[in-house]
Image (cartoon, rainbow, N blue to C red):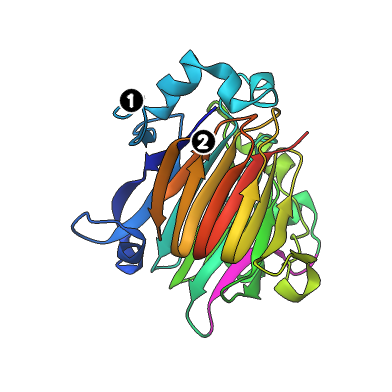
Amino acid sequence: MSVIKLAPYAKCYEWGGQALRAFGATQEGPIAQQWELRVNNENPSVVVTGSWAGQTLKCYIEENPDKAGTLAKAYPYFPISIVLVDNQKPSMIQVDPDPEKIQALYILSAKKDGCVYCGFDAAMTRDELVSHVEQGTLGSLIRPVPVQAGDALVIEPGTVYAIGADVQYLAVQQDAPLRSFSFAQVLDAVRLQGAALQKEADRQIVGDGQANTTLLADTDVFAMFRTVCDGEVTIHQDADSFGSIVLLEGSAVITHEDSIVHTQKGDSIWIDAGTRDVRLVGNCVYMYTVLTQ
């Protein structure tokens, strides 16, 4: 059982900015995304420590399926990806009709009046939805949700949403094979009510004097936790799922048996399923994600 560091992969798009440079991105131009955990599609995560250094995480899992855990084996496709996003311009209105595409957002930072637009202000019929799409007025009906650092939002499949300008966030996304949908199928899948924003004060925080851990999202596919550590944390990874750590602030040293992994802001760590007694020491904030039943 191992703890390994992954190499994040950044992508530049014109709607990105410079905020992700603080997370280690070095590409020239406006950096829009930094993939922290990615197995499917192009540019999968690459292992940078241990005996598998230089190999892709996809290859690592294919050769060692038990290291992803028993829950991952139930999916024909590796089930999640994790990405940091710097959204400097308002995104297009979007909706994912695939019922296997739930995602959770954690707001890293946002301008003073930053918003995520999610769901509709009022219920409507399918015919009314079609009319607004045809007239190009759908955007005026999407509910603006003010956001700030520390907020989390679960976006269910079929939820119409958009990301406002100058909002930076981490997204844990369920992955599934690409499927084609007709316009009618998309309309049928649209949720006419939006998801509620989970404010930090509404969540339960578990602390032990050296670390406080908050459950940010608990879905049918994954759970997402934020830990603020000023000292030491011990992680016992269950055999049913791998563990993913993304360092959001500070630095830490992670040890397991004879291996030592030094981490800093923006680093991505993979913990094999079934790995016990993982010791994390540092002054840091990190996101921890696992699969759920």
| Count of numbered badges drawn on the protein | 2
Left or right, 251 with reference to 146: left
User: What residue sits right under mark 2 in the picture?
Assistant: 257
Q: Nearer the viewer, mark 1 or mark 2?
A: 2
Instruction: Find disc 1 in the rendering and name its residue.
Output: 55
| Dot 1 amino acid type | Gln
The image position of residue 186, as x and y in percent, is 65, 40
Q: Which residues are magenta?
A: 113-122
User: Which quadrant holds residue 117?
Assistant: bottom right
Residue at (56%, 31%) from the top-left corner? 272
Among numbered discs 1 and 2, the one appearing first in the sequence: 1
Outermost residue toward the top in this view: 63
Please tell me whether mark 2 sits on a helix, a strand or a loop: loop
- Residue depicted at 49% across the width and 75% down the height: 110
* In magenta stretch: residue 112: no
Q: Is residue 115 found inside the magenta-colored segment of the image? A: yes
Mark 1 falls on what kind of element?
loop
Q: Is residue 93 above or below residue 103?
A: below
| Residue at the far front in the pictured view | 258
**Residue 132 can be seen in this image:** no
Quadrant (top left, top right, bottom left, bottom right) of the C terminus: top right
Q: Nearer the viewer, residue 155 or 240?
A: 240
The quadrant of the image that shows the N terminus is top right
Query: In terms of image quadrants, where is residue 216?
Result: bottom right
Q: Position of residue 38 (x, y in %)?
A: 45, 36
Crowdedness of circle 1 by 10 Å Cα count: few (<14), some, many (20+)? some
Q: Height in image: 184 above or below 55? A: below
Q: Is residue 47 rendered to the left or right of residue 40? A: left
Q: Is any part of residue 141 visible from this angle?
A: yes
Task: Farthest residue to the left: give it.
Answer: 28
